[in-house]
Structure formats: structure tokens, C-alpha cells
Amino acid sequence: MVLTIPLVLLLAAVVALLLRSKAIGFGAAVAVALFGFYLADTGASDNVNQLVTTITGALADIGR
């Protein structure tokens, strides 16, 4: 059985854990979220998407 988790939910869980453990502050989390939001609106979004797709594909191949 293959379990798929959207990357955005995984990253949200990581940010929530970091905030809960006080590893990062609320302001830093908001700044990173806003950076990601605005980065998605630039020409770099295609490159970032391809990079994440390649990395997740490679990780999936390691598990086989």
C-alpha cells in the first residue's frame, strides 16, 4: 500500500513542530511562508517545482 502525503501538508507539519518546540519564532515562520507565496508568483516557481519533483521521485525510487 502506497501512502501519499501532499508536500504542502508535510511542510506545514514541520513548521508547526518547529514553532511548538520554539526552534523558530512566529515571525520567522510568517516570513518564510510569505517568501514561498511570493516565490510561487515568479519565474523561479517552475524550476523549484521541477527540483522538488525530481527529489521526491528519487526518494520514491530508493524505497523500491
Image (cartoon, grey):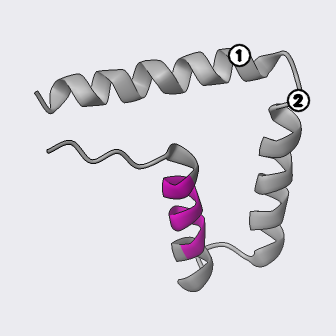
The magenta-colored residue range is 9-16
Q: Amino acid at mark 1?
A: Asp
Q: Which amino acid type corresponds to the residue marked 2 in the rendered image?
A: Asp
The image shows residue 26 at horizontal and vertical percentages of 77, 76
Q: Residue at x 14, y 45 (%)?
A: 1
Q: Is residue 5 above or below residue 57?
A: below
> Does residue 13 show up magenta in the picture?
yes
Is 5 magenta? The answer is no
Q: Is residue 27 left or right of residue 29?
A: right
Label 2 residue SS: loop
| Residue at mark 2 | 41
Mark 1 lies on residue = 46
**Where does the C terminus fall, quadrant-wise?**
top left
Instruction: Note whether 37 is above or below 48 in the view shown.
Output: below
Residue 35 picture location, percent across and down? 83, 45
Tell me what residue is drawn at x 39 percent, y 29 percent: 56
Residue sitting at 86 percent across and 52 percent down?
34
Report the predominant secondary structure element of the magenta stretch.
helix
